[in-house]
Image: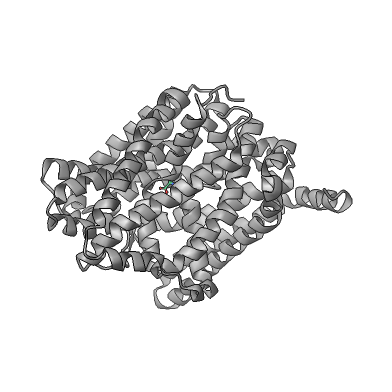
């Protein structure tokens, strides 16, 4: 049972919006949007945000407040045998943090290099040891904030960082209106194409991106919800978090795509978008250095407040389960995350740590950062709605309850299955052409599928009880 609390509703909202708005809104949203046909992708994205993410946000926040504990204890309070699920979620979050901090380090490196006016190209920057140095700095900074606690650390940081992020986004988006490619960017961003709705791949990408961007289904909101007071309306809060997160992503799109189209760059950008493609445009802009500092500054602040929320999930669990204090738990976890992040940090360096010909960082982003998210969202929805039936959670969800119970779990299971098959099919083909890389894909697909089977097996008795309860006494 945690005694820590946010000081106010505003503090809670700034912290949760801080958790949500991050690299996912700026660096990832634009590249996923670009790769999936621009505005066409917006329809599944918005549907996934409001129909899946909002109800899950309410669920997580309400479970957190009802149980007032960390994510592992929350799972274990439903049934001791589910404790492992809690650790699985925490493990996934910390793995995400390990490469997220590497990216945050790159952002800080770019911010400083533009500030001092000595911009180095991405390949030169990453080939040396500097990125590892910045990785150390941001890891220590994140740990420092979390070690100061919910009010003194996380909330205090969010109160400074979040208004700055939105102010910079709005200013940059206003400046981007003056670019010749603005009209083309708006058309690219906002022209819906309903025909893509028939493509399962676009849906799966949209759901994955929404989960990443909104920090939902990862125990983050459950942990932040455990620090709220009674009487806070979680439906309104969840709507606000979602709208703020989408607004940040669209504003970022309204900054990035006008630059892309005005400078003849490629809209189908990848991981390196912010670090290689955009700087080429900053160099040729009249006030390019100011724009670059504002851009990397906002990216850094957004990433920092998200990294803090990821670490807090682990620290909350560690302090409850080991009874060590916040300071020590933070130090230990920060060190662990740093070690786990080293392969990602070295993957773009001259050491070039590659797996199956791809940088480790990209592999971790695609596996944990993409495939694991719907799995942990599925676990949370099934365990806290099917296996447990908390009256307070039921009340908080209200009319959203049937959505969380009957719609979200099958949709997430389908997305996960589609992804496992999406990995399995090309991996199978690859197995014939390039046995080593193909084997890796088959192993990943096999792991995802066995996880689903194990999950069903572990939950079987609770689920049949719940189904029986449902049949006997319909609510
Ligand atoms: N939501 C944050 C972002 O968009 O960058 C951080 C984040 C949280 C990323 C949870 C991934 C994740 F699973």
**In the image, farthest residue toward the right:** 472
Residue at the location (31% across, 65% down)? 185
Q: Which one is in front, 9 or 63?
A: 9
Q: Could one spot residue 185 in this view of the protein? A: yes
Q: Position of residue 97 (x, y in %)?
A: 41, 43
The quadrant of the picture occupied by the N terminus is: top right
In the drawing, does residue 279 fall left or right of residue 392? Answer: left
Residue at the location (23% across, 39% down)? 133
Residue at the location (57% across, 34% down)? 225
Residue at the location (44% across, 48% down)? 245
Q: Is residue 159 above or below residue 57?
A: above
In the drawing, does residue 396 fall left or right of residue 110? Answer: right
Q: Could one spot residue 443 in this view of the protein? A: no
Residue 157 placement: quadrant: top left
Q: Which one is in front, 316 or 392?
A: 392
Q: Position of residue 35 (x, y in %)?
A: 38, 67
Q: Position of residue 281 (x, y in %)?
A: 18, 59
């Amino acid at each position: 049972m945690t005694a820590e609390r946010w000081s106010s509703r505003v503090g809670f909202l700034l912290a949760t919006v801080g958790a949500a708005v991050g690299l996912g809104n700026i660096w990832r949203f634009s590249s996923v949007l670009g790769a999936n046909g621009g505005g066409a992708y917006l329809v599944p994205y918005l549907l996934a945000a409001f129909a899946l993410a909002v109800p899950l946000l309410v669920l997580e926040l309400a479970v957190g407040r009802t149980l007032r504990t960390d994510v592992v204890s929350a799972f274990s309070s439903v049934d001791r045998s589910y404790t492992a699920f809690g650790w699985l979620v925490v493990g996934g979050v910390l793995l995400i943090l390990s490469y997220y901090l590497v990216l945050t380090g790159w952002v800080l490196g770019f911010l400083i290099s533009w500030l001092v006016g000595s911009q180095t190209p991405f390949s030169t920057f990453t080939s040396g040891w500097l990125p590892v140095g910045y990785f150390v700095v941001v890891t220590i900074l994140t740990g420092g904030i979390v070690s100061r606690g919910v009010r003194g650390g996380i909330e205090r940081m969010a109160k400074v960082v979040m208004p700055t992020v939105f102010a910079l986004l709005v200013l940059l988006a206003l400046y981007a209106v003056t670019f010749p490619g603005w009209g083309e960017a708006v058309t690219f961003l906002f022209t819906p194409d309903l025909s893509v709705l028939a493509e399962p791949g676009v849906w799966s990408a949209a759901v994955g991106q929404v989960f990443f961007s909104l920090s939902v289904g990862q125990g983050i909101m459950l942990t932040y919800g455990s620090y709220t007071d009674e009487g806070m309306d979680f439906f309104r809060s969840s709507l606000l978090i979602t709208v703020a997160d989408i607004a940040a992503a669209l504003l970022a799109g309204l900054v990035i795509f006008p630059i892309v189209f005005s400078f003849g760059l490629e809209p189908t950008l990848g991981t390196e978008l912010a670090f290689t493609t955009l700087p080429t445009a900053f160099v040729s802009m009249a006030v390019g250095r100011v724009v670059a500092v504002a851009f990397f500054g906002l990216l850094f602040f957004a990433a920092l407040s998200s990294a803090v929320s990821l670490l807090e999930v682990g620290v909350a669990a560690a302090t409850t389960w080991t009874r060590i204090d916040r300071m020590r738990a933070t130090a230990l976890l920060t060190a662990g995350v740093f070690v786990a992040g080293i392969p990602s940090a070295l993957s773009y360096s001259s050491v070039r740590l590659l797996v199956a010909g791809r940088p480790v960082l990209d592999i971790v982003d695609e596996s944990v950062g993409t495939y694991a998210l719907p799995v942990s969202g599925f676990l949370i929805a099934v365990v806290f709605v099917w296996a447990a039936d908390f009256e307070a959670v039921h009340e908080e969800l209200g009319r959203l309850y049937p959505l969380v119970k009957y719609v979200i779990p099958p949709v997430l299971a389908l997305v996960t299955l589609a992804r496992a098959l999406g990995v399995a099919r090309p991996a199978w083909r690859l197995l014939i052409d390039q046995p080593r890389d193909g084997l890796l894909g088959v192993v990943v697909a096999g792991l995802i599928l066995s996880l689903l089977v194990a999950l069903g097996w572990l939950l079987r008795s609770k689920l049949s009880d719940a189904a029986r309860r449902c049949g006997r006494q319909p609510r």
